[in-house]
Amino acid sequence: MLVTDLGLLAYWVATATRLIAPYPAEVLVDWNWSFLGLDVMVSVTGLAGLWLLRRGSDVGRWLMPVSLALTHAAGLTALNFWVLRGEYALGWWLPNLWLAVFPVVALVVLWRSSRTGRSVSPARTSIRPRRPSG
């Protein structure tokens, strides 16, 4: 999750500084920029959730699913756009497939950990027993 959230922010910096070449059609440039607000919300909620979890706050457990749902929506929306256009360039499909699929897997892990009373460690992907709050 950390890599994905930081990756989105890095993508927007690269786009803004034109390290990533703009689309040839202006409407596609506008379409791409229409994701900025959503992607920033993904990163802010994800990074805040991870930070709060590290600090022992249960609020992080509420922010993580929000971030993952927004991430999934962004990836799925982009994939739908490329399907409608009939374009299947791996350079756009692979990152957007990641954005659509990774959150579903992560949400399943979060859901299972909450059902078993175990918490997911924000520092690594292993699952450890939940500490009593106090």
Image: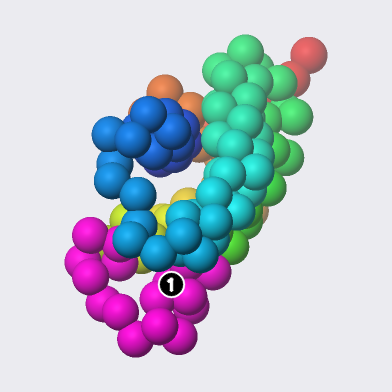
Q: Position of residue 97 (x, y in %)?
A: 36, 65
Magenta range: 75-93
* Image side of residue 131 versus residue 126, left or right: right
Looking at the image, the residue that sits furthest to the right is 134
Q: Amino acid at mark 1?
A: Leu
* Image side of residue 45 versus residue 127, left or right: right
Q: Residues within 10 Å of mark 1 (few under 14, many from 20)?
A: many
Q: Position of residue 54 (x, y in %)?
A: 56, 18
Q: Position of residue 95 (x, y in %)?
A: 32, 56
Q: On the rendered image, what quadrant is the C terminus found in?
A: top right
77 part of magenta stretch: yes
Q: Vertical placement of 37 versus 25: above or below?
A: above
Q: Position of residue 24 (x, y in %)?
A: 33, 61
* Image side of residue 100 versus residue 21, left or right: right
Residue at 23% x, 70% y: name it: 89
Q: Vertical placement of 25 versus 134: above or below?
A: below
131 part of magenta stretch: no
Residue at 63% x, 25% y: name it: 48
- Asked if one can make out residue 93 in the rendered structure from this viewpoint, the answer is yes
Q: On the rendered image, what quadrant is the N terminus found in?
A: top left
Residue at 43% x, 72% y: name it: 79
**Residue carrying label 1:** 79
- Camera-side residue: 26 or 73? 26
- Camera-side residue: 105 or 16? 16
Res 43 quadrant in image = top right
Q: Vertical placement of 107 versus 79: above or below?
A: above
